[in-house]
Image (cartoon, rainbow, N blue to C red):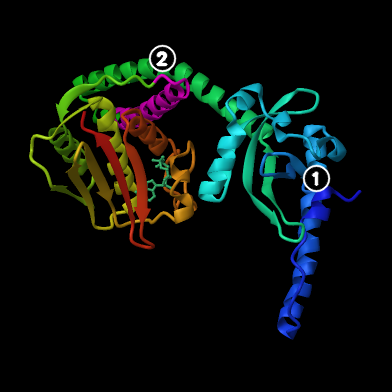
Amino acid sequence: MKTQLAKKVSRPKSTSSRAPLKKAKTKFKVHDGFYRLVAENLEDYAIFTTDIKGMVSSWNLSAEKLLGYTESEMVGENIYIIFSPKDREQETLKKEFAKVAHAGRAISEGFHYRKDKSAFWASCLIFPFAATEINEEGYTCIIRDLTNQKELEQRKEDFINIASHELKTPMTSIKIFASIIENQAKKAGDDILSEFIAKLNTQIDGLGELVNRLLDVSQLQSGKLELKRRLFNFNDLAEEVIVAMQQYAKDNEIVYVRKESKNLMINGDKELISQILVNLLSNALKYSQAKGKIIFSLKKDKDKIEVCVQDFGIDISVTDHEKIFQRFYRTEAVRRKRISGVGLGLYIVREIVNGHGGKIWVESVKNDGSTFFFTLPIK
Ligand code: ADP
């Protein structure tokens, strides 16, 4: 069966007789047929077009399979039929169309409804559609079923919740017992045992930190980021953290560039903000791999502060600039170099920054390191 999409997505006719152009057009026609074929056969992607009001004008085979409506049922029907009642009420589609007009495309995630009223989680990409030959304008929509991904996400979240809570209690006991044994070994003058227990303690601290991170993530997921705001001196905090981090930074020097007075007071959760600084600085140390200095700079801009942590080590490609803030995402470069990490730090950092009403982003120069910026409102 030929779908409506195949019939409607046609190209303008040739008006020129120049040979190269003709050749290119023949080639394009071949491609055109190829793209039609791809559109009709894509398994997990429902592809359809609508007019500017959202009335369906074409509906591919995958759309039939995914949503349960046939082409003849859908052509001429309002696409809102596959949206939730809430989306209909809030005129979500109208807003998405407005986004397309403004940004050239709109992408969203949410529930869509099949003919049998069952719901599934999907991404929806919308971009403009123009068939010049029949003088029709509208939108192309691509709906992708994300049920499997959503389930996987849910399983990951459940695992993080269980693992973090179940590990916390035994971790605390192990730490206490290890400290008792360490003290006793010292008292008994057993140097070898003391040395082993000290090493054991370092490993336990590392594990404890990981468990705390998982706990942070599980709290963030349940929307429980509680900010204990108070007024504190940001300069003092930054200096404290830098001095502490410098002890770990044997091969790097952390340079503090302060463009403001020493009494820069801000209203925020001091512990959590300190966690942002520790995370960004330890990443800069870890990923600059002993390559020179790390520049920490601070400036005030009207009602906010802007902090910047720059290193001269591994760079981050533009395509990864957003992804590194997602849970468990690690770039190819650091995985290839086998640098340890779990990919949770920046996710937590971004949640803390957002929780304070600030912004965080990264800039990077090829082969010349990465610079992380974040802003925080002063009040
Ligand atoms: P982790 O460091 O445990 O992997 P993060 O969430 O802190 O987790 O960072 C996510 C990823 O972002 C890192 O794995 C790395 O690929 C990249 N990244 C973070 N900071 C830097 C940096 N300063 N330089 C280069 N890459 C970085």
* Nearer to the camera, 315 or 21: 21
Circle nearer the N terminus (1, 2): 1
Left or right placement of residue 52 versus residue 265 in this view: right
Give the image quarter of residue 98: top right
**Magenta highlight range:** 195-224
Give the image quarter of residue 13: bottom right
Residue type, mark 2 in image: Thr
Q: Residue at x 44, y 44 (%)?
A: 324
Query: Which residue lies most toward the bottom here?
Result: 19
Percent x, y of residue 228? 27, 19
Question: Is residue 218 covered in magenta?
Answer: yes
The answer to whether the residue bearing label 2 lies less than 8 angstroms from the nearest atom of ligand 1 is no
Left or right placement of residue 178 versus residue 47 in this view: left
In this view of the protein, can residue 277 be seen by the observer?
no
Percent x, y of residue 44? 74, 42
Which residue carries the number 1 mark?
60
